[in-house]
Image (cartoon, helix red, strand yellow):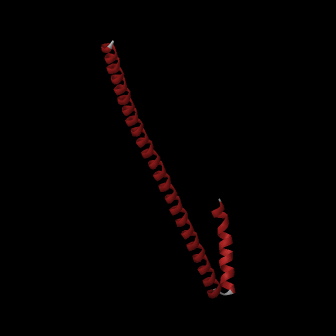
Amino acid sequence: MLAEYQRKQRDALKEAEQIIAHARTEAERAAQQAQRDLEAAVERRQRLAIEKIALAESKAAAEVRNVAVDVAIAAVRQMLAEDLDATRRSKLIDDAIAALPPRLN
């Protein structure tokens, strides 16, 4: 009987060691998977941040261009208003109207 109990104790101990070894393997596998998932999430967030930055840069460049165009138009208007007499203004308007039909086609 003693030998049988000792055998059962050894078997139980082996089984416990196998369970522990399996648990360690599963824990390592889970940790590796968690690391891969974390790296993928960080990569996704980094890519999204880069895309947002590029979009913001594009918007800023467009706004700067628009402001530059507005300033240029205002400067030309002021120059034309100050430097042109009525005859010259009428001629420019007539020339612009005459140039419209070919440009619209």
User: In this figure, what is the number of numbered marks?
Assistant: 0
Say left or right for 89 vs 48: right
Taking the image as shown, residue 71 lies to the left or right of residue 54, namely: right
What percent of the width, then of the height, locates residue 8? 35, 17
Q: Nearer the viewer, residue 80 or 36?
A: 36
Q: Residue at x 42, y 36 (%)?
A: 30
Q: Nearer the viewer, residue 43 or 18?
A: 18
The residue lying toward the viewer, choosing from 90 and 38, is 38
Taking 53 as reference, is 63 above or below it? below
Q: Residue at x 65, y 72 (%)?
A: 96
Answer with left or right where residue 29 lies relative to residue 92.
left
The image position of residue 89, as x and y in percent, is 67, 82
Tell me if residue 65 comes above or below residue 7 in the rendering: below
Q: Is residue 23 above or below residue 78?
A: above
Query: Observer-nearest residue: 53 or 94?
Result: 53
Image point (41%, 43%), residue name? 35
Residue at far front of view: 2
Which residue is painted at 59% across and 81% down in the image?
75
Q: Quadrant of residue 105?
A: bottom right
Horizontal and vertical percent for residue 103?
A: 63, 63
In the rendered image, residue 12, in percent from the top left (x then y), is placed at 36, 21
- The furthest residue to the top: 1
Q: Quadrant of the N terminus?
A: top left
